[in-house]
Image (cartoon, grey):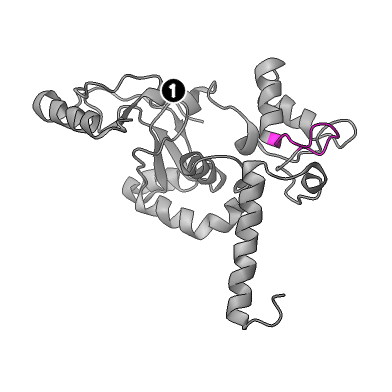
Amino acid sequence: LLHGLPKGLQQQAAEEEERRLRMSRRLGFFEENQATEVNDPCSMCRLPGHTGESCTEHAQWLQDHEKLSCEESLARIGRDPPVDCGCKCNRLEVCDLKDQEAWASDGGLIRGVGLTEAMQRGDLAKAPIYISNCRFGLHGPIEVLSSAAVTAYVSGLPKCEYLLDQPWGEDKYLDRCMLSLGVTRANVFSLLSETACGEEPAPCGGADVAFHPFKRIEDYFACWAFANSYGHGPASKEYTAGSV
């Protein structure tokens, strides 16, 4: 059907079809026989009877219910059918990393490419660094990246395409993509107060930069008014960072 269209429209139609298929995979709308045809090695389980499960769901179930480690769950789901799912995944795609100190502790640091060199030059501002603002990983209400981190992200996007089939929001995708690209991750949990991070942002009088969520107009302005009248800045403190 596309052959009779001008080349520009053919390319546009092909790109639209690819976007539609990718969205279908993300939302889990593939039928069982279609799921077995997905080429992404870390997309859907290929074990008969489990083809409606994503690789991520299967691995995290093993971590939650059978108490397997990240590495153990990767090995388990990586076995080919009919033994298991045949999912060829890495830890950034499927593992729950919140129990690792450098991942989930305030002040934790996961060293990336260029950090040591920038520190030796005394020019840390030019190092690729981004901030994780929550103990469960980067959350979207406020995202802080150095200019070098943005450059690394834009130039390295093709290397993160393998993450697109995961059922994540853009914040978790950005977090895992940055780590895949070797960008330094610094945990600074004092930027954001959010209920999804196990905190209570209301009435917005803390030293945080952002408070979330306030979905109703009256709640938003009540938060703003309280912060404007009674909020206070951060107290100075020694910041000790664990690192890996």
Q: Is residue 64 magenta?
A: no
Question: Along the horizontal axis of the image, is 39 left or right of 148?
Answer: right
199 or 68, which is in the foreground?
Answer: 199
Counting the numbered discs, the total is 1
Chief secondary structure of the magenta portion? loop
Q: Position of residue 26 (x, y in %)?
A: 62, 44
The reply to whether residue 122 is visible in this rendering is no
Q: Position of residue 116 (x, y in %)?
A: 44, 43
- The amino acid type found where label 1 is placed reads Ser
Q: Secondary structure at mark 1?
A: loop
Residue 84 in which image quadrant: top right
Q: Is residue 54 magenta?
A: yes
In the image, what residue occupies the spot 58% across and 71% down?
12
Residue behind mark 1: 105
Whether 162 is drawn above or below 88: the answer is below
In the image, what residue occupies the spot 51% across and 31% down?
244
- In this view, which residue lies farthest toward the right? 82
The reply to whether residue 20 is visible in this rendering is yes
In the image, what residue occupies the spot 61% across and 53% down?
161
Q: Which residues are magenta?
A: 45-55
Question: Along the horizontal axis of the image, is 198 left or right of 210?
Answer: right
Q: Is the N terminus in the top left, top right, bottom left or bottom right quadrant?
A: bottom right
In the image, what residue occupies the spot 76% across and 44% down?
31
